[in-house]
Image: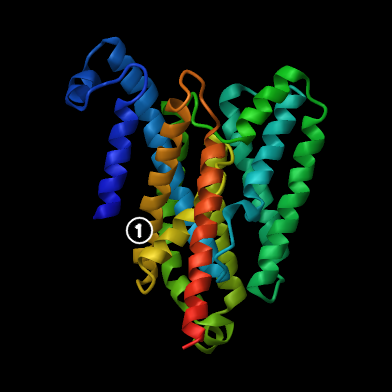
Amino acid sequence: MLLGAALAAVGLAALCLGRPVIAPAHLPAALTGDTLESVVLTQIRLPRLLLGLLAGAALGAAGLLLQEALRNPLAVPELLGVSAGAAAVVATITVFSLPLAAPLLPAAALAGGVAGGSVCLLAARRARAADSMLLTGAAVSTALTGVVYAVTSMADQFRLGLVLRYLMGSLVGADWDDVALVAPWLGLAAPAVVLCLPLLGVLALGDDGASALGMRPRTARAVVLAVAAALVAVVVAACGPVAWVGFLAPMLARRLAPLAPPASRMACAVLLGATVTVAADLASRTLVHPIELPLGAFTGTVGVVGGLVLLRGRAGEQARGGGR
């Protein structure tokens, strides 16, 4: 209830604040009018808000799937190889001016993200422990990031600016085409997320406990990670790598509902991911107006600092519990 109210408040602020400021009472008229406020609201702020909501919700869900499947609060979607794979494709197309129509660039990024995630999953499929899978993902992501660095080092100043803007993650220029790209994919992924929730409940028992119940832990883990990779790939294709939302949102969800079933924690993570993303985007475009700061700078700062605070609090609670 409180999370829904917080998300509604942040969404309302995102629609109203900026240049020009639109009073909440004027929003219904602005949605149907033909004034400057109407154009700003319907063609800029509304699609940007919806894309932020979808992206944040997807990253929150992907983060929870990853952390619960690997039973590691430090697991982040960026370690799936998806973000780095998409970034490598976009950097290559941009720097070398490959003949690809602009509307197809998000699709190419999506393909690169899926390819990077697939490499990670195929390599991790043979891992015997969750931590090994996490290390495999880190290695794949590092290798793909090296490709990005190598490609960008050959870019001229103009193309380098384009690549860096994408790599920092941004909702600048978001339009209804971006929403149309993301929404159907996430609609298809939503049932898969729901079907993964029972697997998370069994994986929480540990590999031995899951095996005793007839589950193959490595196979179940790979399925969950594949769903998480698909969610992240769609977001990266439309917005670039929006860092650390998938780290902070699930940690907050477990903090708020530590004993809740996976479905309740998933709902919390989705709401928190959407709230954090929209709030960070609002801050990025209003704090130093008319300059828009990178969305990834805000999500990265908030995600890392908030996550470390939560981890420290969790470690303190475990230490106090062990001393009793």
Q: Say above or below: 293 vs 237.
A: above
At 71% from the left edge and 32% from the top edge, which residue is drawn?
A: 91
In x, y percent, where is residue 247?
53, 55
Amino acid beneath label 1: Ala
In x, y percent, where is residue 57?
42, 48
Q: Say above or below: 98 vs 300.
A: above
Query: Foreground residue, 15 or 154?
Result: 15
At 58% from the left edge and 77% from the top edge, which residue is drawn?
A: 217
* Residue 168 falls in image quadrant: top right
Residue 166 is left or right of residue 25, and the answer is: right
Residue 55 is left or right of residue 28, and the answer is: right
Residue 187 is left or right of residue 240, and the answer is: left
Query: Colour mode?
Result: rainbow
Query: Foreground residue, 62 or 212?
Result: 62
Query: Foreground residue, 200 or 259?
Result: 259
Q: Which residue is mark 1?
A: 267
At 36% from the left edge and 51% from the top edge, which residue is drawn?
A: 271
Say few, some or many: other residues with alpha carbon within 10 Å of mark 1 (under 14 / 14 to 19 / 20 or more): some
Residue 245 is left or right of residue 135, and the answer is: left
At 34% from the left edge and 28% from the top edge, which residue is drawn?
A: 46
Asked whether residue 99 is in view, the answer is no
Label 1: state its secondary structure: helix
